[in-house]
Image (tube, rainbow, N blue to C red):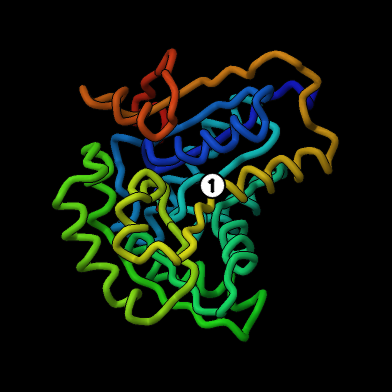
Amino acid sequence: MEKEKPIGVFDSGIGGMSVMKQLISAMPNEDIVYFGDTARVPYGSKSNATVVEYSMQIAKFLANKNIKALVVACNTVSSIALPSLRQKYNIPIIGVIEPGAEFALRETKTGRIGVIGTRATIANNAYSKSILKRNPKVEVFEKACPLFVPLAEEGWLKHKAVYDIAEEYLKELRDLNIDTLVLGCTHYPILREVIQEVIGKDVKLVDSGVTTAEVVREEIDRIGFLTNSNSMGNQRIFVTDINPNFKDVAELFLGMKLKEIDKVDLETLTA
Ligand code: DGL
């Protein structure tokens, strides 16, 4: 039965669990298979060709798990690899950029929107293209904040260093008087308190994961594939590397305890 198949979710690493958290909250009865490429993260500093190659390997792995839809939780992958993935697989494939762009446009009152993300997401102008395609009248200001990723993975959520780095990255956007800021990277939602303090309390922060989960739910419902189950869904986690910190950091992103985690060898993935 199509309805009882799991939803596949993937990210360059563990940050995508911030998106999985939203998926669980929007669709608690769905089974999820999550793949995090923890051996090869970060993708945000890699070339587009490499990001596409890795994404296709992961999609193949998840397709073999018989998924009914694929959620690309990674902003970097969503900004680069969606056309290649959609060309190859005939299931709903949902990235985080379009839902995040919609959300930002819903929130802004002044039409001045900031976007932060990895170098690759910002260099590809993924959010600005998507926002301006929907409404060419707004203004979008983008800024790469690559150091937020290792800080979040270190679990430094309110450390002084995070404030200093956030000040350095965000002062430009603050001076541009934006009223909405898109957290265009899986890792940024867990740093939101510091980001909010530094950018100013009146700026609305947009977590793409929230609207992505809504879009995924709508899309699966539209094609009649929502599960009939009334019990809590199961999450299977596959990663390419498990370091000693992994579980703690993953649970920080997910906001709940993780059960089983399986390691997938890169040789198997790339075979
Ligand atoms: N998952 C990535 C993203 O959302 C951040 C980590 C990375 O650079 O791979 O863009």
Task: Estimate the x, y position of residue 147 in percent, counting from the top left.
Answer: 22, 55
Q: Is residue 271 visible to the viewer in this orientation of the structure?
A: no
Q: Quadrant of residue 198?
A: bottom left
Locate residue 161 relative to residue 181 in the image: left or right: left
Q: Residue at x 27, y 58 (%)?
A: 146
Residue 169 sits in which quadrant?
bottom left
How far across and how far down the image is residue 106, in percent?
Answer: 64, 65
Residue at point 62%, 40% (across, down): 70
Q: Nearer the viewer, residue 172 or 6?
A: 172
Query: Which residue sits furthest bottom?
Result: 137
State left or right for residue 226 relative to residue 152: right
Q: Position of residue 20 (x, y in %)?
A: 52, 35
Residues 232 and 97: in front is: 232
Secondary element under disc 1, as helix, strand or loop, is: helix
Asked which quadrant contains residue 264, the reply is top left
Mark 1 crowdedness (10 Å alpha carbons): few <14, some 14-19, many ≥20: many
Q: Residue at x 46, y 23 (%)?
A: 237
Tag 1 residue: 209
Relative to 258, is 209 above or below?
below
> From this viewpoint, is residue 199 visible?
yes
Q: Is residue 260 above or below residue 146?
A: above
Query: What is the three-letter code of the residue carrying label 1?
Result: Gly
Q: Is residue 80 left or right of residue 1?
A: left
Tell me the residue at 35%/75% (across/down): 173
Location of residue 152 with respect to 240 vertically, above or below? below
| Viewer-nearest residue: 6 or 169 | 169
Which image quarter holds the C terminus?
Answer: top left
